[in-house]
C-alpha cells in the first residue's frame, strides 16, 4: 500500500495496481527518518500509517518471483 512519490515511480516490479482504501489507518508523520530527512543525532519525520479512520492510496500486486528471498 503506497502513496506519494512511490505511487508515481515505484522502485519495484509489479503485476497490477489499483486505487484502494485502507480502513482503520491514517497517514501521520510518525516515522523517524535518519537518512533522507535527518541524521542519527536529529532524525526527521516522514509519513507512516497509524491507527485511525481510513486513508486512500494504491495497492500493488507483486509477483512471488519479484520478492527478494521468496
Image (cartoon, rainbow, N blue to C red):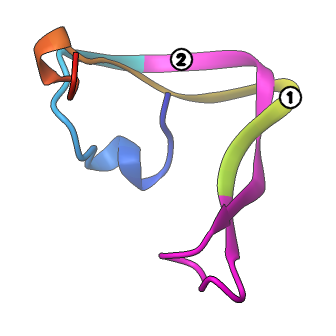
Residue found at x 14% / y 23%: 66
**Residue 35 is covered by the magenta coloring:** yes
Q: Secondary structure at mark 2?
A: strand
Q: Is residue 32 above or below residue 70?
A: below
Q: Secondary structure at mark 1?
A: strand
Q: Report the disc number at residue 51.
A: 1
Which quadrant of the structure image shows residue 61? top left
Magenta residues, start to end: 19-46
Residue 47 screen position, x and y as percent: 66, 54
Left or right: 42 as drawn, with respect to 70: right
Residue placed at 63% from the left, 18% from the top?
A: 21
Does 41 sit above or below residue 50?
below
Horizontal arrangement in the rendering, residue 39 relative to residue 43 (left or right): left
Residue assigned mark 2 = 20
Question: Percent x, y for residue 22?
Answer: 66, 18
Q: Hey, which residue is sitting farthest left in the picture? A: 65
Q: Residue at x 24, y 15 (%)?
A: 16
Between 38 and 8, which is closer to the camera in this rendering?
38
- Mark 1 packing: few (<14 Cα in 10 Å), some, or many (20+)? few
* Earlier residue among tags 2 and 1: 2
- Residue 42 image position (x, y, % from top left): 72, 87
Q: Quadrant of the C terminus?
A: top left
Q: How busy is the neighbourhood of tag 2: few (under 14 within 10 Å), some, or many (20 plus)?
A: some
Amino acid at each position: 500500500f503506497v502513496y506519494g512519490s512511490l505511487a508515481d515511480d515505484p522502485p519495484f516490479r509489479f503485476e497490477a495496481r489499483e486505487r484502494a482504501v485502507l480502513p482503520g489507518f491514517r497517514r501521520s508523520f510518525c516515522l523517524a527518518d535518519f537518512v533522507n530527512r535527518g541524521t542519527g543525532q536529529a532524525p526527521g519525520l516522514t509519513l507512516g500509517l497509524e491507527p485511525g479512520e481510513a486513508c486512500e492510496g494504491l495497492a500493488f500486486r507483486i509477483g512471488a518471483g519479484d520478492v527478494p528471498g521468496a
